[in-house]
Amino acid sequence: MSNRLRLGHEALARRDYPQTRALFREAAAQVPASPLPHLGLAELARVTGDEAATRQALSDALKVAPRDARTLFAWGSWHSAKGEFDKAAEFWNASLSVDPAQPQTLVELGGLALEVRKRPAEAAALFKRALAINPQLGGARYALGMTLWQLSKPDEAIAEFEEAARLSPKNPLPLHSLGRVHAQAGRAELAMVAFEKAIVAEPAYYPARLSKADLLGAAGKFDLALVETRGVLASQPKLPEAHQKAGMLLQSLGRVPEAMAAYQEALKFDPNLAFALNNLASLAVQRKDVPDHGLAWAQNAVALQPQNPLFQGTLAWVLHKSGETAKALAVIEPVVKGQGRKTPESHYVLGAIYADSGDKQRASAALREALRLNPGFSGAADATQRLRKLQSPS
């Protein structure tokens, strides 16, 4: 039987499905008490997309060996693939009760605890149990690292990512996550090294290149970041986040028409990118060839994220520049008293509208508050200039 099973799996690997089916059926006839040929047939049915045949083969395996750990594990995986996570956990736990030394089952339960049930502490315990059985599981190391990061244990997460990268040197995921942890902690040089290693490990893994672009942009190297982002777009021309990132970099470089084109390209592939909509509206105010100053873009951004004070500020500014100052104030005044009270940009927009309207006292107060909250925010130079003008005797 073992020979027929081996040949069946070899046929499955080379996608000779008729031969696979024949060999597994022969194995099942030779040793009718074994679940393994039925599990092979279940895998064949899964690969070929035959759900009814998959269920039948799994049922046959369970019938001949109701206490077989591999069969129970396979049932758990089948339920998980269907989104039936409670049933999946039931079968995986039953499998562990038969054979507690199954690292893969523990990893699956850990993934369920982390991704579905949002219980990272429980997930970490399961991943650690799996690694106690087999310390060489790179995937479990990576999963544990992600879990520890969620649990605000970055140093422990780094250790797991480094070990996962050692165990699976061609896998870019641990290296990318390692870089993200370093970047979050402000260790830009270490983050860049990790991102570069992730790109070398798998050049087609574009998230690492986008993270590298973010790091370059944060350092003010907008041209280099743009080169990296456009490199991603060369292979992923329909990736909305890359087009949006290109727009942000072009905006930082002062290349407004190109930035607007990039944002619009992003929205072609994902019309719900709130930042692209907001930034388009913000740039439209600067353009004389956009008659409504991007009002629809600003309104759509706020509709997507109604509690975002930055987006509300953009809408207020667009309304003001469109000659709807009363409506603009109706938008922005509640913001600075609510969710935008600690956002310098909100106070700046309010102050600029007051200044344009001739209300010097309230304009000065709002602009001072913006600078008090953050003397280096993006509109600080204009806020300072407006304050000087308001305080001028003329």
Image (cartoon, helix red, strand yellow):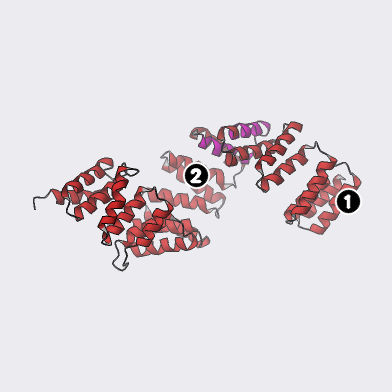
- 152 or 56: nearer the eye? 56
- Tell me if I can see residue 142 in this picture: no
Residue furthest to the left: 393
**Residue at the image position 52 percent from the left and 51 percent from the top:** 199
Which span of residues is magenta-colored?
123-151
Q: In the picture shown, does residue 268 fall above or below 4?
A: below
The residue that disc 2 covers is 194
Verify whether residue 222 appears in magenta. no
Which SS does the magenta portion mostly show?
A: helix
Residue 205, label in figure: none
Q: Amino acid at mark 1?
A: Glu
Image quadrant in which you'd find residue 251: bottom left
Q: Secondary structure at mark 1?
A: helix
Residue neighbourhood size for the residue with mark 1, other residues' Cα within 10 Å, grouped as few (<14), some (14–19), many (≥20): some
The percent position of residue 175, horizontal first and vertical second, equals: 53, 44
Spatial separation of the CA atoms under disc 1 and disc 2:
50 Å
